Image (cartoon, coloured by chain):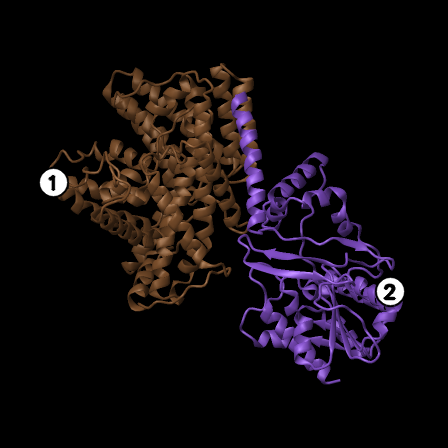
Amino acid sequence: MKKLFLNLIIYGFLILIMLELLVRVFHLGKDTPTRYVDQYNVEKWMPNQNGFAVTGNRRQNFSEYNINQSGYNSYREFNPTYDKKEIALVGDSFIEGFHQNYYNSIGKKIENLLEDVEVYEYGYAGYDMADQLHLVHAYKDQFDKIDHVIFGIKFSNDLTRGEYSILSERLALESPLNKALKKSKLLVYAKSIGLLDPPKLFIAKLKNTIFNSQNRKGSKKSPSNKTNTEQEYLNNFKQLVATYGYDKQRFVLLLNSKETSNIFLKYLDQNGFKYIDFYKRFQASPRPKNLIYDRHWNNYGRTLIAKEIVSHLRTY
Amino acid sequence: MLFNSLDYFIFLPLVFLTYWVLFKNKLTSQNLFLLFASYFFYGLWDWRFLFLILGSTLVDFIAGNKIYTTEKVNIKKIWLGVSILFNLGLLGFFKYYNFFIDSWVDLMELSGYTVNNTYTLQLILPVGISFYTFQTMSYSLDIYYGRLKPTTNLIDFATFVGFFPQLVAGPIERASNLLSQITNSRIFNYEQCKQGLKLILWGLFKKIVVADSIAPIVDDIFANYGDYSASTLLMGVTLFSFQVYGDFSGYSDIAIGTAKLFGIELMSNFKFPNFSRNVAEYWQRWHISLSTWFRHYLYIPLGGSRVSKLKSVRNICIIFLVSGFWHGANWTFIVWGGIHALFYIPVFLMGRNRIYMDTVVAENSWLPSLKEVAQIVFTFTLITFSRVFFRSESITDAYLYLKQICTHFSWEAYSHPQGYRMIDYLILLSIFTVYEFSIRRDERSPFKFKSKIVRFLLYSIIILAMLLFYDDQVDRSFIYFQF
């Protein structure tokens, strides 16, 4: 019995090392840049980092990212001036665009379509409206020089809070333990393909059983609940605008009207908030707009977004 | 609890350690513990069905002893009848009741009568019922035919019926093999455990990498066969052949490997059937425990091949139709069985049904001869053709699938439903086939290489392949659980 366990431990250990080696050699695991909070309390990526984003078990999507001096994924540095024409795209991972080479981003596509314009992509995975407006407010000097600021917004996700604060859960990813774990590419890979979900689920179930806590079942929202939530999100938007300011002339929201509450759209229309709706353009095209291995826009989806933005800007 | 779940990878080491550490050299305790673990394992599906296993166990335990102790042949027959009626009654009710009702209603409607079908019931098919009922019946039959002495220990017998590695999908063991091991003391054997672990690893590979990874493709093609060309449909059914083989033989390997961890040897269930040189050889290599069950308890009692040619042909038809029906309450399985009978009969009439019993393809060489390659391809094609019926939801679907192949005979590239690269699967299945060919002589030693380094590299590659093809969205249950 001892021999069996000893051999299992030795073989197990050696196989783990071998797998770590193979995952590194074939670059199956994604690189994860370091995040931090700057002097203005803005959470962003540590400047000047490079790496590769990988999706799919067999590296089906592989792209390079480049974090510039401002802490965002872009091929260019952000140096706005009053002389040049600049556009800022502010948003979450869809704008951040780790899923495509940074030289083929939405910003670059816009630059290719419009002449003499610089596009700055302030994209960061997980940014909601509070993050975005706080960022613009914190870097007011910079953003005042930018001609158009476009905020990516998904109504159901991005208006859950009415005030900005640093999200400790996200920063916990930079804890010493997490950093140490991320050093293992095998672990990062296993997590990305969903292999760690069953143990996580098991532990959660065990915790539930031990502490006898009630199961939180996802209940369908009743119509009145839904209206309440939508009203709450709208109030959050109003509160954010009141707190951090909103220049209706230069700022515009980028949204999918199909996924946005009518109450919210009505409010935007009635109060002069401009928005770019990409629903119709997406709907009109039969080709897939999202990546196969995750929900982010693929190259074609990004091209459509860039075209929609350009089409909007040309009207102003 | 599925063999390929995290639950099982927590359950198995715990049971293994308790079995060998706490109950070492204590046979009764070991068996009692195995029984408890087995019922726990099964009860996680649905504890109510434990009563069916208990019922089947008690009936055959009593029937077995009564058959053995009574002198009168009529009484023996009555007790054998009780055993068979009870077990087939369970199967008939849970598995075939609705099928018979629906078929009766269809027949009446065909005859011009309108029947309001209010007789069908909302029944859940208890997992593994076809397997354990056959196993318990074999016990009573063996005692009846004087091939076995019954056990007087109910715990031992219940452990034989409920032994968790093979409870839900076999191999269907005969008491002469499994029960005798359960009643005898078992000592820890390092080599046996090592072999068991290797078989578990190989079984997991076949399940996760071969079967589960191609399942979405097969599901998509069979669900939308009307939209695809012949090339895609042919690929779909070929992939299904690999899927069902990877799934069921993977399960069997894990079952045999797990049993080895407890010092118990189960019979082989698969011996590389994809390299069969004719249909008869295929049936000596595919789902062996079921084939031998039918041979022992149905084909031979009917006279087997020791009767006239005509009667032998009748017996072959019976055995294949019953075997098809065993798989599921659907006409598709009966037709599938019938097709295999049609494939088998010419081989039997030519006297070629036993010529490959003791040999493997390329017996004395590295590579098969051209003749053997042609034989293998021909046999595989026949078997794959029959799988259209095995996989389709109904006879109509199977017919339309085949019709679509004949009427849309063109080549079109197929796109994976999730957009994966199809070339990955082609490479995977090619490597898998070549590797299986290299180990074709011994189904119990998938890693029979002398060099430790080669073995280590193989283990690493196999685990890496599991990661590369792991799909957290796929339904991970085993195909044969539905039977």
State which quarter of the image contains the C terminus of chain A: bottom right
Crowding at label 1, few (<14), some or many (≥20) Cα neighbours within 10 Å? few
> Circle 1 sits on which residue?
B309
Q: Position of residue B361 (x, y in %)?
A: 26, 41
Image colour for chain B is brown
Q: Position of residue A95 (x, y in %)?
A: 70, 66
Q: Position of residue B476 (x, y in %)?
A: 50, 46
Quick one: B338 or B46, which is closer to the camera? B338
Q: Disc count in the image? A: 2
Give the chain letter at badge 2. Answer: A
Chain represented in purple? A
Residue at coordinates 66% horizontally, 39% vertically from top-left? A203
Give the chain letter at badge 1. Answer: B
Residue found at the far left of this picture: B308
> Circle 2 sits on which residue?
A138
The amino acid beneath tag 1 is Lys
Quick one: B380 or B119, which is closer to the camera? B380
Residue A230 higher or lower than B447, as above or below: below
The amino acid beneath tag 2 is Ala
Residue B17 higher or lower than B420, as above or below: above
* Res. B109 in view: yes
